[in-house]
Image (spheres, rainbow, N blue to C red):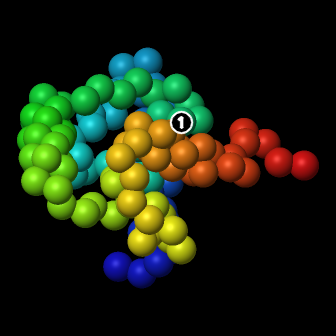
Amino acid sequence: MNHSDIILRQWESLEALICAKDSATVLLTGRTLSIPDVIAVARYNVSSDIDVSAIKAMEMSQGLLEQRMRSGDVIYGVNTGFGGSADLRTKNLIELQRALIRELHYASSSSFP
C-alpha cells in the first residue's frame, strides 16, 4: 500500500465518522485510536466513550505507579523534573504534574494569527 492509499483510507474513515456523527461513537480502548478518530471527536463533535477494559488498564497502571513511588523508585517526569531538569527531585508531585500540564499548553490555541 502506498502513501496515497493510506491517506485516502484515513480520509474515507474520517468522512464516514462525520457523516454518521449523530450515531457514531469513537470507543477509547487504549489500543485502537486513529488520527481520523481524534479529528472526528475534536473538530466535528463525534461522541466518544471509554471501554471498561481501558479503565481497568488505567487503574492497574495507577496502582503500579503508586507502588513504585512508595518503594522510593525514581520515575522520570513523575517525581523528577523534565528535560534539562531531569536530575532534580521533588516531593511536591501535584505541583510537578501541574507544571507539566502548563508546559504542554504553552503555545496551544484554537487559532493562530
The residue labelled by disc 1 is: 42
Q: Which residue type does callout 1 highlight?
A: Ala
In percent of width and height, residue 5 lies at: 43, 71
Query: Is 54 situated above or below 67?
Result: above
User: How many numbered discs, if any?
Assistant: 1
Query: Is 64 situated above or below 46?
Result: below
In percent of width and height, residue 60 lies at: 9, 41
Along the horizontal axis of the image, is 91 left or right of 60? right
**Farthest residue, direction bottom:** 2
Q: Where the N terminus falls, by quadrant?
A: bottom left
Which element is circle 1 on? helix
Along the horizontal axis of the image, is 49 left or right of 43? left
Q: Can residue 61 be seen in this view?
A: no
- Residue at x 17% of width, y 56% of height: 72
Q: Is residue 41 visible?
A: yes
- Residue at x 60% of width, y 51% of height: 103
Return the residue nearer the eye: 78 or 42: 78
Return the residue nearer the eye: 4 or 49: 49
